[in-house]
Image (cartoon, helix red, strand yellow):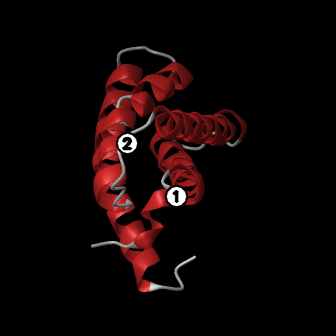
Amino acid sequence: MFNDKHRVIQFMRFSVVGLGNTVVDFTAFFLLTWGGVPYLIAQAISYSSGVFTSFYFNRKWTFKVKNRYNVLEAAKFIIVNGLSLLVASGLLFILQDVYHLELLFGKILATGGGAALNFTASRLWVFTKARSGIA
């Protein structure tokens, strides 16, 4: 996955954007669950809270897309994030309800699984025009 400098830099930028989104996600998730919202509903709401800023920053900064925004690209991004949400929610359910892992640790592991899928699909399918350079 990290066989060239360009891809490493992309992943690092993706991680920085993701860290910001994760702070928003975790804050919203735990506020919602502490307020009595069921954890899978809280997961969907909190995850969705960072999707729009993620699209903007990953498009402009991480993958350096220079062409105009288009609906197809946005639709692909939403699909990828929907799949990432499903994967993360499925992992969270398994870790919480099957393995009875502490909610915080389950959320961390589920977020990592969703992020791995998200980066790979964003790089290979959503922001494909960005491969020409990183500067």
Residue located 30% across and 34% down the image: 27
Quadrant the C terminus occupies: bottom left
Q: Which residue is mark 1?
A: 128
Which of the two labelled residues, at mark 2 and mark 1, occupies the earlier sequence position?
2
Q: Which residue is mark 2?
A: 55
Residue 117: % across, % down = 59, 53
* Mark 2 residue crowding within 10 angstroms, few (<14) / some (14–19) / many (20+): some
Q: How many marks?
A: 2
Residue located 36% across and 38% down the image: 26
Q: What's the distance in space between the residues labelled 2 and 1, CA to CA? A: 14 Å
**Along the line of sight, which residue is nearer the eye, 102 or 109?**
109
Residue 96: % across, % down = 61, 36
SS label for mark 2: helix
SS label for mark 1: helix
Quadrant the N terminus occupies: bottom right
Residue located 30% across and 39% down the image: 53
Residue 99 image-quadrant placement: top right
Residue 70: % across, % down = 43, 37
Relative to 99, say whether 61 is above or below. below
Residue located 63% across and 35% down the image: 86
Residue at far top of view: 36
Relative to 6, say whether 126 is above or below. above
Q: Is residue 26 left or right of residue 37?
A: left
Give the amino acid at mark 2.
Phe
Give the amino acid at mark 1.
Thr
**Along the line of sight, which residue is nearer the eye, 64 or 122?**
64
Q: Is residue 127 left or right of residue 15?
A: right
